[in-house]
Amino acid sequence: MLHDKIPDQRGIIDRRRVAADLDRAMMQDGSAPGQDPGAEHRQAGVEVLRKALREGRQEIGRRLEAEPSAGHKSAAAQAFLVDQLIRIIYDHLTMRLDPEAKDAGPEQLAIMAVGGYGRGEMAPRSDVDLAFLTAEQRSVQAAPLVEAMLYYLWDLGLKIGHSSRSLDEMIALARQDLTIRTALLEGRFVWGSRELFDHAQKRFWKEVVSGSERAFVEQKLEEREQRHRRMGDSRYVVEPNVKEGKGGLRDLHTLYWIGKYVHKVRHSADLVEAGLLTRSEYRSFRRAEDFFWAVRCHLHTMTDRAEDRLTFDVQPEIAARMNFADRPGKSAVERFMQYYFLQAKRVGSLTGVFLAQLEEQFTRSRTARLVSRITTRRRIVSGFVIADGRITVPSEDFFRQDPVRLIEIFAVANREGVDIHPDSLRIAGRDAGLITGKLRRDQRANALFLDLLSSRDNPEAALRRMNEAGVLGRIMPEFGRVVAQMQFDMYHHYTVDEHTIRAIGRLASIEHGDLAEVHPLSTRIMPRLRHRRVLFVAVLLHDIAKGRGGDHSVLGAEIAATVGPRLGLDEEETELASWLVRRHLLMSSTAFKRDLSDPKTISDFVAEVQSLERLRQLLVLTVVDIGAVGPGVWNSWKGQLLSDLFTAAEEQLRLGYMAKGRNQVIKGRKAAVGRLLDRDSELVRTVGATMTAAYWIAESEDVIAHNLRQIADTGQTPLSVVCRYSPDRGGTLVMVVTPDHPGLFSRIAGGIHLAGGDIIDARIYTNRDGLAVDNFLVQDPLGRPMTEQDQIDRLTRAISDSLADRLRLAPQLAARPLSHARSAAFDVQPRITFDNDASNRFTVIEVNARDRPALLYHLASVMSQANLLINSAHITHYGERAADTFYVTDLLGGKITLPDRIEKLRQQLLDAAGEAEWKNSETQTQAPATVADGH
C-alpha cells in the first residue's frame, strides 16, 4: 500500500512539527549547528523522537481498534511512521554535521528500505531493515552520518537490520547471496540521493536479475520447502506462525517475489496482468494478506514484541479484538481460527497453482523435458488427457458438460498415479459450485467418491487435493462444515479436516504394511476385515459432527446413518459405520481409563462390542484416530494397552466368558516369568504365591520378574526402588516395593513429580505379606521417556527421600511450573464422577481437571485422608486436561455407596483439583496421614 493512500498522515506523525521540536531540544541542550552533539547530548533529541514514535504507534493502534481487520492500512502506516522518523533524523544530522550539506547533499548516500519494510509493510515490532548505499567504497563523508543515524534509531528501541555498502559491493554480493538478492528485490527509496538509488535499481535489474530468473525460482521453491518442514509442514497446525507458517504471509510474499523477479511486476496487482493470477484469485490474495497483516499487527500490539506465533494464550483476545463472537457449538476463538485456516487454505490453493506453473516453466531442465517427450506418450483416460505425468482437461467447459467429472478427475489421477495439472485444479475449483444436491445423489458420483476414499493407492493425497480445490466439501457438505475447523485445546494439533485426512492416510499405510513395526496388531487385522470400505467411511465421519453442539459421537452416528446409503453402503454396512462413529472413543476410553485386569471391565466392553468384526474395526479406527492427532501423541504404551484390551475381549468373544481362561493365562504367565528368572525361577512358586490373581493378570512378565526379585530382597532392605527405561512402553518404569504404610501412594507420586516426572500409569498392589508393590510408567513433561542416568538417579533419590519424610512435598510441588505453560488459556472446569457399576469390587472415581504438577499427588492425598484404599490408578492426558481414574474401596474392602460420603468426597476432590486449592497449597505443609490405608 503506497503512503499517499494513508488517510490523515499528519495524525500519525507531523514531520515538520517533530523536526522543529527536535531542533529546539538540541539548541536548548547547548550544541551548535555543525557540531556533533555526541551521546551525552543526544538524549534530548531522542526524547522528542521517542515521543513521536510512541504517539504514532498509539494512533495506528486506535485506527486498528476502530477497523480491526484493516491489516494493509495498519502495516502501511507503521512503515510510513518509520520512514518519517528516518527522514527527520537524516535531515537533522545532515544540517548538524555540515550546514552546507543541506543544499549540496553529503557525498552520495541513498537510504533504502529492504525486505518487508521495503514493501512498505510493517507490524508494530517488526525489524527495520535498511541498506545504506554509497557511490564509492570507504565513503569518508557518509560513514559518520550512518553511524549517528544508527545510534538514534537504536536509542529509539527499534530493532535495526542494516548494511552499508558501495554500489559495486551491493551488486557483487547480490549475485552471490539469495537472501540479499531477495531483500534488494523489494528495495524502496526512503531518503538521501534519489539519483544514486535509481542508478542502483537499473544496475540490479541488469546485472543481477537478468538471466538468473530460473535459478532464483528454483532457490525460492527450495527455501519454501525447507521453511515448511521447519514449521511442521502443514498449514493446519493449531498454533500457526502467521508470518513463516505454511499458508501464511511468507507464502504470499514468495508469489510476489517470483512474479516480480520473472515478470518485473511493481505491485502485487500486476500479477494479474502477468497472467499468474486471475482477478478473482488476486482478490483472494489481497483478502488473505489483509487478514494476516491484521492478525500480525494485533499480535505485536498485544505482546509488545515481534511475536508471529498465534499461540493458544493469545487466540481468544485476538478473536475478541477482531469482533468474532460465540455461536451455538462454536466459541468465538474457534470461529476466528476457522476463518484463519480458511484463508491459509486459500493461500495453499493460490500457491499450488502459481508455483506449479513456474516449476513446470523453470525447474525442469531441457534434458528432463527431452527425456519426458521421448518416454511419455499422450493418452486419453475417461476423456482426460494424461501427459508428462499430469492429468489435464481437454477444454474449459469439460466439467460443465458433465459435473461428475469433478470427482472423476481425482479418482483417475489417484488410480493412474499422476498429478493434476494446476490449470485443471484451477478450473475444478472454479466449477466446484456445479456440485449441487442433484449431483450428491448421483449414483455414479458417489460410487467414484467411495472408490477413491477406500482406494488401495493413495487416498490421503487424493482427498487433500480435493479439499484444497474445494470439491470435497461440495460432494460431502457434512465434511465441508468441519473444513478448517479447529478445536481450542492443547491435545489436537490439526484442524478437524486435516486430522481426518491424516487418519485416512494412516489407515492406508497400515493396510499397505508400512506401519507394521508401529502397529503390528492392526496390520495383522486389516486383511481379516469383512467390511473393509466401511472402516474408511467411519474414519471419514468419526469427527464429522464437531462444532455442531452436543455429543459429536451421537450426532456423527446420525449423519453416518444418512450418508452411508447415499455413498452406496448396504444396510449392514451402514449400521456398522454408524456404530463405529458412535463408539469411536469407547476403546481408548476403556483401555486408558479402566483397569484391564478387572473382569467386569472386559465384560462391559464386550457387551458393547458384541462381535469380532466390530472389535477389529474399532481397534483399527482407534489406532488411526490417535495416531493422526499429532506428533508424539501415539506411543507404544498406548499400543500395549489397546492390544491388551483387544486380546482379552477377543478371548471372551470366542470363549463366551473371559473367566474361563484366567487360570490358563496365569499359568502361562508364571511359566514365562520362570524362564525370565532362569536360576531364580523358584521365586515364582515362593514369592509369587503371595501375589493375587489380579496382579498376575495385569502385569507383564518382565515387570513381574523384577518385582519378585525386589520382594525377595526386602528381607535385607525395607525399600526397593528400581527405575529403568522401557523402550517398548515409551516411558520409564518405576517399580517400588516397600512395607505398606499410610499415604504411601501419594508420597511416591509426589517424589516422582518432584523429580520432573509425569505419571501416565500406576498399578498398585498389596501382597498377602503386607508388602506394597507399586509399578509406575513415567515420562517427562514433554511426553518422552526419562533415559539419562542423572534422570534415573533423580527419580530414585526423590522417591526414597519422599518415603523417608525428608521432603516437604506440598510447598515444593506448588513451586514447580505448569507442565504446559499455556494451559492457563483454557477454561477447564474440574469434574468428578463416581461409578459403582464399572467394577464388581471397586468404586471407580474419575477426575477430569486441568493438568498441573502433582495433581495426582493432591488427589491421592485427599483419598488417603478420607480412609480410602487405592487399588489402581490410570492416568490419561489430553493436552491441558488430565483424566485420572482410581479404583478404590473403604478400609473394609467395600465400595463407597453412602450418598453423603460420596458428596463430601466429591467436594474434597474438586477442591484438590481446582485452582484455589492449588494456589493455596504453596503455604501448606505436608499433613501426616493417620490411617493405615496402605495406598
Image (cartoon, rainbow, N blue to C red):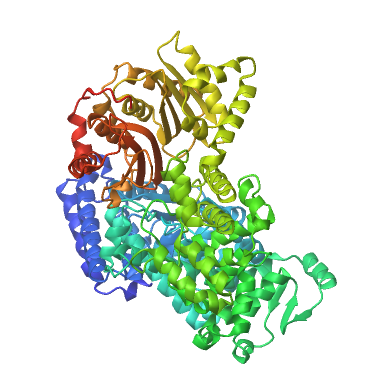
Count of numbered badges drawn on the protein: 0
Residue under the point 60% across and 54% down = 172
State the image coordinates of residue 201 (x, y, percent, origin top left).
52, 66
Residue 672 picture location, percent across and down: 62, 28
Q: Is residue 583 left or right of residue 155?
A: right
Split into 4 quadrants, where in the image is the N terminus? Answer: bottom left
Q: Is residue 270 above or below residue 192?
A: below
Q: Residue 720 in the image: x percent, y percent? A: 44, 17
Based on the displayed image, in which of its 4 quarters is residue 755 positioned? top left
Relative side of 393 to 536, left or right: right
Q: Residue furthest top?
A: 716
Q: Is residue 465 above or below residue 905?
A: below
Of residues 262 and 176, which is closer to you in this image? 262
> Residue 548, located in which quarter of the rendered image?
bottom left
Q: Residue at x 36, y 45 (%)?
A: 883
Q: Quadrant of the C terminus?
A: top left
Viewer-nearest residue: 550 or 346? 550
In the shown orientation, is residue 14 left or right of residue 483?
A: left
Write the residue at 19% across / 47% down. Answer: 44
Residue 334 in picture, x, y percent from top left:
35, 63
185 or 917, which lies in front? 917
